[in-house]
Amino acid sequence: MTKTLIIAEKPSVAADIANAIGNCTKTADGFERADVVISAAAGHLATVIAPGADKSGKSLETLPVIPEQFEVRPIDHPRALARFKMLQRLMSRPDVTAVVNACDAGREGELIFRLIYEAAGCRKACKRMWLKSMTSDAIREAFANMAPAAQYDRLADAARCRSEADWLVGINGSRGVSILHQIIRGPYQSTPTGRVQTPTLAILVDLEEKIRNFKPADYFEVHGTFGAAAGDYTGRWYNSNPTAGAGEEGEGSKYRITKREDAEAILAKCRGAAPSSVQDETKPSTETAPRLFDLTTLQREANKKFKLSAADTLKIAQSLYERHKVTTYPRTDATALPEDYVEPAKQILADMSGTKYEAHAQRALRSEWVRPTKRIFDNAKISDHFAIIPTGLKPQGLTEAEEAIYDMITRRFIAAFYPAAEYLETVRITTVAGEQFRSSGRVMQLEGWKAVYGALIDNDDKTPALPPVSPSERVVTKTVELKALKTKPPKRMTEAMLLSAMEHAGRLVDDSELSEAMAGRGLGTPATRAATIEGLLSTAGAGGKTKEPYLVRDKNNLVPTEKGINLISFLRQIGVGALTSPAMTGEWEYKLQLMSEGKYERTAFMHEIEQATRDMLDAIRGKAPAVDAVTLAVPCPKCGGAVKGGISSYACERQCGLEVRRQLLSRALAPAEVAQLLEKRLTDKLEGFVSTKSNKPFSAMLKLTNEWKVEFEFPPREEADPAVLAAAPALKQVCPKCKGTMRALETKFACEKGDFYFNRTISGRSMIDVEADYLIEKKKTPVCGGFLSTRTGKGFLAGYKLTRDHKVELFFD
């Protein structure tokens, strides 16, 4: 009997599918029954690669790397590779005649499956199983309504283009910027430039610049307290026809007085004067329930209420979906439900009987509030997945954090069906000596959806109502006060605020079409925004080393580090500021959206990305300082080709992969030094390298390895012959470490006990014996000439100093 292989994105989802369709037996590879084999990936198991990219594109001359065609290969990681081979073996089984993509229903899930399918070399018939939630009913429905995979080819094209375009811009941009950073600023520093990460960082850097450059302005307010028969109330002096003042436009400026003398004049005028009139304007207002949660909104609310990071919220929401099955798929950007979901929504409410939500759920059902309104049920507002809602299953064994997030999701779902909360809002204008004081208050008339939250609601419902004033009543002025205040800088962003900025990044884009395209996605996707923020906060470097992050958390605020600020500044300085703008993402999303709808061709999109990559590298090269073109007299030791010096490196013109950077650890390599390296595979000892850890200079030889890589080689410490050392002239000063006799050798000054020595020649200048004595006695010599820069070849002035750890260094006045 032939079988169909179903591939889920994760093993837990494979288990849920097996349980839902029934009659499946557990196997080493997953689950199996007479007609079906079920197994799973574990996220991405294959990836797109550019052949030869690891050997080329290491200099500005050889960038960008644009392959004629991307290849798909399994990810070279033991666990990922083992799972890939398992799936490849299942696909090749003779009894398997069809393969089903049951990965997450969306662009990324489409990509995960398609790359595995292609890397495995599979050519069998393929279908798509589109899972919207993990309840058994939803799984069985998806299983019964599988569609040909070809129906999703356009979505797959968009997914593949996004992946390849991210590679082209990310790899070439990062390499180009990193190399240019080294040329201009010295030490090599890996400078990643992602189309989502970089503009996200730029949002915070631009805000930080406003905060640092903010200059507070003085302003004043006049506050009055008035007494009525029903009680006291307060009001602020109010200008109904303001001009912008104290650095703020709009409503806030109506209360602000920029000059102290003006405020004092109002104060003197009103103090002791009774109000001449009190006028109330009362009107009804409503507040509708918030929309259902998408992932970004859930992350924002969790950060506000519980200080949870976006990554932690996603992890909890994923657990509620996968492990507990009490909520729907979390990685969604939709705040609506399908139009045919009215009856399932009623059933979910009915399933809440016996829980703390029963009374609210039953009220919504009895009142027939669950109706097909566009605010809740709208297919046009759903792309891959609908909003995050409870599934109706009763939760068991939730952690405290899981319970908190589940409660947020469930109350939001119930409240969505309730009527709006209704208020009576009153604005009171109290006129004193011709000056107006404004007061406001409101009274709830109908709880509406807020009844679902009760005391949990976090809003301004507690704004007190104004005590009533009858038309004939005489109100008295109790106090009038002047308050001296200062304008405040913009607030730093919390993670909730940054998520909102990323979601609505289209507002930062001037082009209306691009802005509209970003309205649905913004910077990144709901599934990736948490990872983007965590990447900027990460201190984990390559090889387990720590690195300075681009952002740090200050309580619940996100603050860019100097490294982050310098990166954005550098990108704008070198003419690739487009990498810091969300406009690139807007353009990509606009065209990928058209592509998924069959209105834009994959080939056209990739051609534009390739050209944009070339333009980016041209801009980077244009900022590099001019260098003398030189062809070394020594041929390439790898292939015999000519070696030429370019902007950032010496490289073989045959592009065989041999490449030597012009600058290593802040030291420029002269053509003669590179020629010696290529010819003899080892240079003489070179001075002037600067350690990236200690920021101190050091000397070393350069070695060309058998793999054609340049490495540092340190000569063994020179041990002077005891007889030669004893015969050498003695200095007047003794060894600063052990008080032994110091001897003046041909190349160095050394203690005859071997405890201390330093070289005679530093930066091209040879020290005489008198200077050595002076240095040991005084710890520092006068500034003198004769030094020679290894970078520029020019002479410079410097002095010698003896450090506390007994090292001789140069200092500069």
Image (cartoon, rainbow, N blue to C red):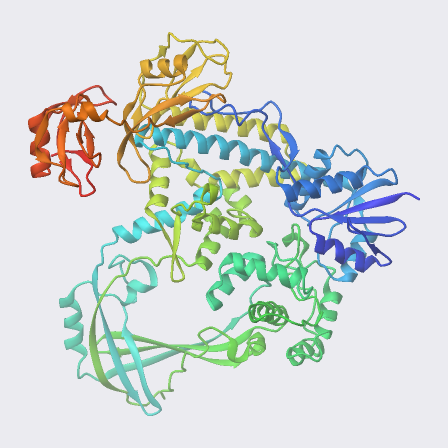
Q: Position of residue 571 (x, y in %)?
A: 37, 36
Question: Which sits in the foreground, 88 or 3?
Answer: 88
Which residue: 20% across, 77% down?
Answer: 481
Question: Which sits in the foreground, 679 or 648?
Answer: 679
449, above or below 530, in the image = below
Q: Is residue 376 visible?
A: no
Q: Quadrant of residue 235?
A: bottom left
Q: Quadrant of residue 633?
A: top left
Q: Is residue 146 visible?
A: yes
Q: Quadrant of residue 567?
A: top left
| Residue 40 appears left or right of 403 | right
Q: Position of residue 371 (x, y in %)?
A: 70, 68
| Residue 629 appears left or right of 616 | left
Residue at the outermost front position: 723
Q: Position of residue 150 (x, y in %)?
A: 76, 38
573, above or below 403, in the image = above
Which residue: 50% across, 11% down?
Answer: 639
Q: Position of residue 390 (x, y in %)?
A: 66, 66
Which residue: 60% across, 61% down?
Answer: 317
626, above or below 316, in the image = above
Tally of numbered tags: 0
Residue at the outermost top position: 633
Which residue: 64% across, 41% down?
Answer: 78
| Residue 233 appears left or right of 63 | left
Residue at the outermost right position: 1
Quadrant (top left/top right/bottom left/bottom right) for the C terminus: top left
Quadrant (top left/top right/bottom left/bottom right) for the N terminus: top right
| Residue 637 appears left or right of 338 | left
Question: Which sits in the foreground, 502 or 72?
Answer: 72
